[in-house]
Image (cartoon, grey):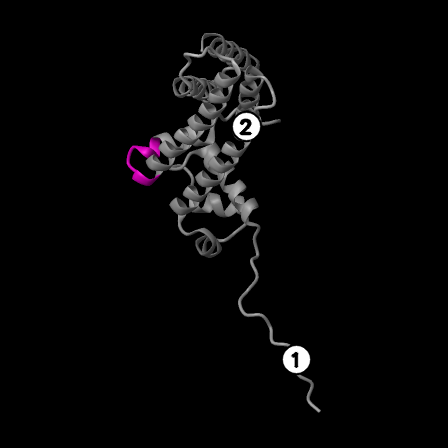
Amino acid sequence: MVQKTSPKPRGRPRAYNPEHALASARDTFWQQGYSATSLDDLSEATGMNRPSLYAAFGDKRALYLAVMDRYISVSHDAMVEALAADIPLEQALMKVCDFALARYFPTQADAHGCFLIGTSLAEAMNDVEVREKLRAALETFDHAFEDRFKVAKKRGEIPADSKPAVLAKLASAIIHTLAMRSRAGDTKASLRATAMAGMKMICASG
């Protein structure tokens, strides 16, 4: 009697971890910039050969856009968590700053600023999709701040005539300053002091 064997599943299982690959690609783009990063660099960083990279993510640009999406998503989720309404406004704002500074000044590595600002500004000049993703990301971050300022206004943490949308852009501007100056060589301690002073002024002036 011939024993039947179970049919083998079709297709090959993934030989890579998508999150690990995106993180490795992110760090490579972050360190070298988009234009200076080659497919060979990405292949070495991710441990995937070129055909595997193409099959998983598409070309270099498609991989960069996927990394952008992931970075924006993680950053937004962290902002929403930091801006929780159960803590005082100034403390919540500083939690966002501390999260940003932790990313801009990684442990045991040189300061490398913000991935989004550091890599996308130059590309946004000539790439409409990168420009749109950057614009949408900045608006998303602004809205996260704005929602928290609306709560603060209702609670009386800021003056009744405050404009949450304006305050949100001011808070975002502080984060942008941290991103640029960290890459330019300012120290983490100096930038945290700047952030604290800036957020305190926003809370006080409304």
Q: Quadrant of the N terminus?
A: bottom right
Q: Is residue 191 magenta?
A: no
Identified at 48% across, 17% down, the residue is 153
Q: Amino acid at mark 1?
A: Thr
* Picture coordinates of residue 97, whole percent (x, y): 53, 21
Magenta span of residues: 122-129
Magenta: predominant secondary structure element? helix
* Mark 2 / mark 1, whichever is N-terminal: 1
- Dot 2: what SS? helix
Vertical arrangement, residue 93 with respect to residue 11, above or below = above
| Mark 2 and mark 1: Cα distance apart in space | 52 Å
Identified at 41% across, 52% down, the residue is 58
Q: Amino acid at mark 2?
A: Arg
Vertical arrangement, residue 52 with respect to residue 192, above or below = below
* Callout 1 crowding tier (Cα within 10 Å): few <14, some 14–19, many ≥20: few
Q: Which residue is mark 1?
A: 5
Q: Residue furthest right?
A: 1
Q: Which residue is mark 2?
A: 103
* Picture coordinates of residue 67, whole percent (x, y): 46, 41
Between residue 161 and residue 2, name the one nearer to us. Answer: 161
* Picture coordinates of residue 193, whole percent (x, y): 54, 11
- Dot 1: what SS? loop
* Callout 2 crowding tier (Cα within 10 Å): few <14, some 14–19, many ≥20: some
* Picture coordinates of residue 199, whole percent (x, y): 50, 13
Identified at 56% across, 53% down, the residue is 16
Looking at the rendering, which quadrant does residue 8 occupy?
Answer: bottom right
Between residue 18 and residue 200, name the one nearer to us. Answer: 200
